[in-house]
Each structure stands twice: as structure tokens, then as C-alpha cells.
Image (cartoon, grey):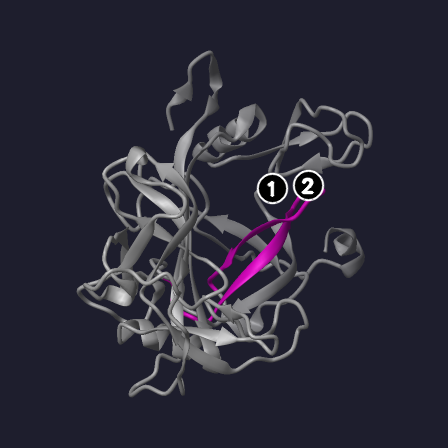
Amino acid sequence: MPPISGTPEALSAPLVVEFPFTRSLGPVQSAFLTGLRERTVLGVRTTDGRVLVPPVEYDPVTAEEIRDLVEVGTTGTVTTWAWNPAPRRGQPLDTPFAWVLVRLDGADTALLHALDAAGPDAVHTGMRVRVRWAGERTGAITDIACFEPYEGGADGETAPRSDEPREPVPHSGEFADPVTGITAPARLDYTYTPGRAQSRYLAALAERRTVGERCPSCRKVYVPPRGACPTCGVATRDQVEVGPRGTVTTFCIVNIQAKNLDIEVPYVYAHIALDGADLALHARIGGIPYDRVRMGLRVEPVWRDGSRYPDHYRPTGEPDADYDSYKELI
């Protein structure tokens, strides 16, 4: 990590937080996404006659369950927009585009997506647009590659545009091989600056030491240090070396294999109160069968060559700690 200019003791580094969220779909969302795969846009009609696109399973006004699916047009009208001059990773287009809310013909609500336009001067509220379908469709919102300006007739026809919007057509929502689940990738890229307190903590870890900071008021030692006591609200400056051994205060057994994490499941992740610390940190437990890990287990860090932090903690062979010695740290 390179030092930040003007604060040589502080660190900074790029950080990526990524979590692919997998969820099952109900009948309404399943029909909507399967329809996109088949180049069909579905909405849902409420009891008062409104057509909602994208469809939802419960009326946002009455909370009543709704299942009355209808097909709407693939052309529509821009209701509002914002220009995006610098697209980011994972966005629909890699060239500047407009984020638009489009009310598709036959719908009463607007759908958020990208509009491929030459520039902000080419976009305006009220302009007509149509769906540009992706070449390969899998049953996801990205099956709509984007919207594009459109001057023709309603719903992709070449005839002059009618002044009347397309009427929604009832649809069964039934398709062959329906989409029943999706994985939605969530990713956040940013630059993390830990600050002086945690920078000192990380520098000590590189020397295979664990350093906390003591509150001058309540005398508690916080690991990792935060630069201030969360209880007293005063700055913490006195560094205290803790551990390296500690006690498992509580733990969980992980049974799901994480992406890009080469650890065989099941394994144990635990809160560990290092000797001399008043705050438990979390780490993986190894060197013992997962079903033998227990509260009070005494552990020590295991380092890999070249590592900046412990790979995991393993049992020390000492007798288990008495519950009263760590109960306040659970």
C-alpha cells in the first residue's frame, strides 16, 4: 500500500467488495424475465386497472397480491433522464449514454434503463424510444441491451405513430423452460484509507505483531484500533501489543463455498479475544475438526510465508478458558 501524500504513516489501497446474490423467483418475476428472453415485455394489472412495468407481486398501494399479467409494447416514451458521460464497469454501454425512465406503451409506470444516444442534446423528455434486444438472451433485465431513439409507429411498426397508446394484451405468463432463479452480481470498487490508527495496526501485522490502542478514560484496549473509544468518545493514542494467543468467544460453521476462496467446507469462523484485548476480532479456525471447535478454546495464529496477516488460528493445547474470563466479549 503506498502512503498518502502528506500523511506518510497512513495507507491507501484499492478495494473491491463483491457479492453475487442468488435468489429464487415467484410466478410474476419468473414470467417477466422469461418473457424478456423471448422478446416479450410483461406487466401486471392492478385491481384498479393500472399496469405496472416492471411487474410486482403485490400492489404497492393496497398490498393485495396481483397475478394478472399483460403484454405491453416494446416502444415507449421517456419521462425523465440523466446523462452519464463516463460509464463504469458492468453498466449497459461502454460509451456515454443516458439513464432514462421509459413508460412503455400500455404501461402506467416507467422502466429504468440505458438509452443509446449521440449526446445529451439528442435526449429530451417525451422522446419516443424502443427496446434494443441483446443478441444472446438468458432471462435477465440485461436481455434489454438498451433503448434507442425511435421515430416509427407504435411497437416497432413502420406505420406512422398512433396518438393512442397500445392497449395491454392479457398474457398467461406461461413459457417453455421458465426462468426460476437468478444470480445478481453486486460489486463496489473504491479506494480504502484505513487512517493512522489502523495503518499502524497493519504495519505491526506485517511484523507478525498485533497492536491495539488503549482508551485513556475507560482503559479498554481495542483491536483493531479505531482511533477513538466507541464508548467514551475520546481519542486513543497509547499503543498496546496484545496476543498473540487468544480465546474463542463464539463461532459459526460455514457450509457454503465462497467464490474465489480456496478453503474446503465446512470450516469455522470465530470471534477471538486476544490476550490483553477488550474487543474480539474474527478469524478462521484450523488445525482441528470443525465439530470440535468450542467456546473457550485457546488458539494461536498461524502465518504463511510472505503473508501480511495470520492465515488462521489453531489450538494451543492449553486448557479451555473459563467462561467468566471472556463472557463480556461475546
Label 1 crowd (10 A; few <14 / some 14-19 / many >=20): some
| 222 with respect to 181 (left or right) | right
Q: Give the quadrant of residue 35.
A: bottom left
Residue at the spot x=47%, y=82% of the render?
27
From the viewer's side, name the closer residue of 161 and 205: 161
Residue at the spot x=43%, y=28% of the render?
12
Q: Is residue 284 magenta?
A: yes
Residue 277, labelled with which disc?
Answer: 2
| 109 with respect to 76 (left or right) | right
From the viewer's side, name the closer residue of 30 and 17: 30
From the viewer's side, name the closer residue of 19 and 44: 44
Residue 243, labelled with which disc?
Answer: 1
Label 2 crowd (10 A; few <14 / some 14-19 / many >=20): many
| 105 with respect to 281 (left or right) | left
Q: In this orientation, does residue 25 appear?
A: no
Pair 1/2: label in front: 2
